[in-house]
Image (cartoon, helix red, strand yellow):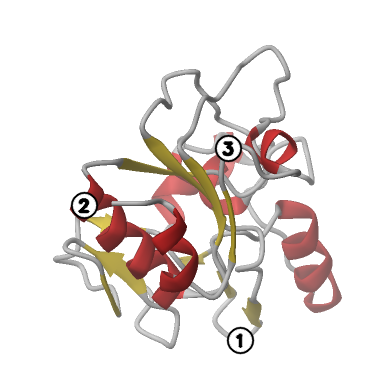
Amino acid sequence: MSHNTLRSAVRGRVLLPGDEEFDTARTPWNLNIDQPVAAVVHVEDAEDMAAVVGYARDAGLSVTAQPNGHGASGDTAGTILVRTRRLDRIEVDPARRRARVGAGTNWGDVQAAAAPHGLTGLAGSSPVVSVVGYTLGGGLSWFGRKYGWAADSVRPSTSSMPMVVEPGSPRSPTRSCSGHCVAAAGISHW
């Protein structure tokens, strides 16, 4: 299966080895780590993510997601690197003291959206780190002693922000959606 067929499967940008911007797109925040990925896909929505998961399954490849390059490892041979930065939707519900964010949203944008409502989140020390990556890593914030880990504040999102479930289809998450779901479009937080 040619990786060029991946380009026709998604709306987002697909970069392959040999493409002019491929090396820049695969480079993580930590420049000491080389990520020898098979492709880089900048997904536009959950349907793109589902298409990438389905394509990877059929091609015998793995998928890893990095909104902005944090959390990189060099163990990426035969992997499609998904950049989720374009999934940056933020919905703040001041009455319920919650926010729903896209998988590519960084903490600085969430804090800026929450501040006018007198709210903050369980963010770390850097505004450029993604909410999803930070939270899935546990997320120990400045407020951790009082409010706990950011991961403990995640609630299932039953709105219009789907997740991708193996074998590669978007759906709304539920409490039964455990380790087999990929956070493609967002999490509900606070």
Which comes before the other along the chain, label 2 or label 3?
3
Name the secondary structure under disc 1.
loop
Residue 177 appears left or right of 52: left
Q: Residue 184 is drawn in which quadrant? A: bottom left
Q: Position of residue 155 (x, y in %)?
A: 38, 66
The amino acid on which the numbered mark 3 sits, given as a three-letter code, is Pro
Q: Tell me the number on the disc at residue 57.
A: 2
Mark 3 and mark 2 in contact (Cβ < 8 Å)? Answer: no
The residue labelled by disc 3 is 17
The amino acid on which the numbered mark 1 sits, given as a three-letter code, is Ala
Q: Position of residue 105 (x, y in %)?
A: 66, 60
Q: Position of residue 39 (x, y in %)?
A: 50, 44
Task: Give the Cα separation between the discs numbered 1 and 3.
Answer: 48 Å
Mark 1, other Cα within 10 Å: few <14 / some 14–19 / many ≥20: few
State the residue at coordinates (40%, 62%). Answer: 5
State the residue at coordinates (50%, 21%). Answer: 73
Which comes before the other along the chain, label 2 or label 1?
2
Task: Give the Cα separation between the discs numbered 2 and 1.
Answer: 42 Å
The amino acid on which the numbered mark 2 sits, given as a three-letter code, is Arg
Give the foreground label among 2 and 3.
3
Q: Position of residue 144 (x, y in %)?
A: 58, 37
Give the foreground label among 2 and 1.
2
Viewer-proximal residue among 40 and 172:
40
State the residue at coordinates (70%, 54%). Answer: 106
The residue labelled by disc 1 is 95
Residue 113 appears left or right of 65: right
Which comes before the other along the chain, label 1 or label 3?
3
Viewer-proximal residue among 25 and 179:
25
Mark 2, other Cα within 10 Å: few <14 / some 14–19 / many ≥20: some
Mark 3, other Cα within 10 Å: few <14 / some 14–19 / many ≥20: some
